[in-house]
Image: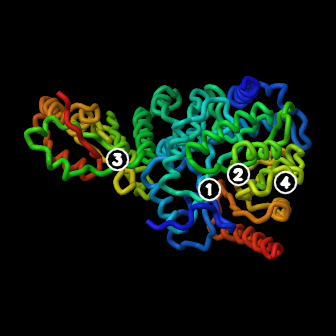
Amino acid sequence: MPALCNDLSSFARTIVHGEEPSSEIDTNYTNYSVAVAVGVYRNNYRGNLHDALAGAYPVIEQLVGKDFFRRMTRQFIGQHLSRSGNLHHYGAEMSGFVAEFKPAQDLVYLPDVAALEWACHCAYFADDAAALDLVKLAQIPPVQYSELILCTSPACHLVRSRFPIAAIWHAHQPGAPGDFHIDFDCGSCNALVCRKNDVVMVFELAEADAAWLQGIQAGISLGEATAATLERFPNFDLQAVLLNIVTQGVLVDFSMANH
Amino acid sequence: MTMPANHTLPCTAGIGLRVPHYREVLENLPKLGWVEVHNENFFGGGAPLRTLLKVREHYPVSLHGVGMGLASASPLDQKHLSALHRLCEVVQPAAVSEHLCWNTAGEIVINDLLPFPYTQEALSHVAHRVEQVQEKLGRQLLVENLSSYLSFSHSEMSEGEFLSELTRRTGCGILFDVENLYVNMRNLGVNAEAFIRAIPAEAVKEYHLAGYSVRDGCLVDTHDHPVYPEVWELYEIALRHIGPRPTLIEWDSDIPALAILMDERAKAQQRLENCDACAV
């Protein structure tokens, strides 16, 4: 379909890159010029992508204001093409983009807040996963626990930051009290995104728990992850973190490490 | 879980169900023939799917896609198609539809519903893709006529002729968007009656109705207004020539209170009933 390919590619460049419409496009319309028609398509293109970004990054939009957010998305859209017919996939690169976006340089926490929002967005649309089968787990002899490979839910994401991103996120949720105070000197934040009863939630994990969970998410065995964590954090409490993440539906399955 | 009929949509009026109305519809269960939702909002699990399944317990559901790009110049997105397949398995929709448009050319994806030249080449291409979709889903796909703001000088047939031939080759159905036809009539000088004559009545399985807006003289398919009188008139003509079919009120932007949407629905329902009365 060479001719169709050429027609569509040329039309695509007209919309996205501002090229003149090809000679294959009719130029005479009764009520408007071809420039108006092309303008409608260009406007739809940018508008749909902007709306997708506004849907995925509501906290960023609140933090910088609607006008500034529009400036940001305009530049983002110019730099990042959509890669999927599903608009909910658009905007994954926002955190990296914000880090390089000069007018927002003073808002040092913004890239990490964007990363947290993208994790929440992905958690919202993630596939369902069966709950952890505790009966099956109980059948594993305790002597083999160290060889367990734990699988986390597709809705679970860990976002680690130097800034209090979980507190910022919570302060900008619908219904949050407006009189919040965020202490930027409170140290690092390990935001755990998960989905429980279909609601996306953000929790904070202690440094040791986050280091351990990062190991688990990387696919290393329970024994290795725990040993590595204890080396750095002698007070690490495995039982407490396990109870916490099982309660939050973070763990969905397990297997045994192959030796 | 019990579900109402899922083989065909009832020949009544339904509404496009959008986020602002989820709760109210589920709490009050208004008298509605059926609802239609956009597929892509339910690819995945969690709250969106759970809500849709609750709705599905009370109403037949039509799954309407905006992202497949049936005419795109790129391989059919198999992930997208698989996600739709999974959704169909769970929801058991009464109808599945997509638009006669493209959204991808090579590396460029444009998340919009874009027109293309109606050529024999495009017909073979789209027919092949519609067949792939129908084969994967194991059911008939309804293909919707498009609203366009420009046209191609080397089209070899009208959109109506294209759709007619597409149904003949693939067995797909037609989702006749009356407002889209009206937009094309005004924007491009399309002959609406010729369109209605061109498409086989028995292939038409659903109507869409919506409101457009006007930008610098161009009618834009924004779904942000009530249905205009001229579109109701065209709908009545379609009802006379083609017959009554399940009819949907679409409203996607500046979404009003549910009561207003229900009033629009009632107007469509009244026309469907008048049409039935005439036939008897």
Residue under numbered circle 3: A194
Q: CA distance from mark 3 to mark 4?
A: 51 Å
Residue B172 location (% of width, % of height): 69, 48
Residue under numbered circle 4: B196
Instruction: Indicate left or right for A251 with A137 as reference.
Output: right
Q: Which mark is residue B95?
A: 1
Secondary structure of the residue carrying tag 2 is strand
Mark 3 belongs to which amino acid? Cys
The chain that hosts pointer 1 is: B
User: Where on the picture, by quarter, is residue B193?
Assistant: bottom right
Q: CA distance from mark 1 to mark 3?
A: 34 Å
Same chain letter for marks 1 and 3 = no
The chain that hosts pointer 4 is: B
Q: CA distance from mark 3 to mark 2?
A: 41 Å
Q: Earlier in the sequence, mark 1 or mark 2?
A: 1
User: Where on the picture, by quarter, is residue A17?
Assistant: top right
Q: Which mark is residue B173?
A: 2
Secondary structure of the residue carrying tag 4 is helix
The chain that hosts pointer 2 is: B
- Mark 2 Cα shell of 10 Å, populated few (<14), some (14-19), many (≥20): many
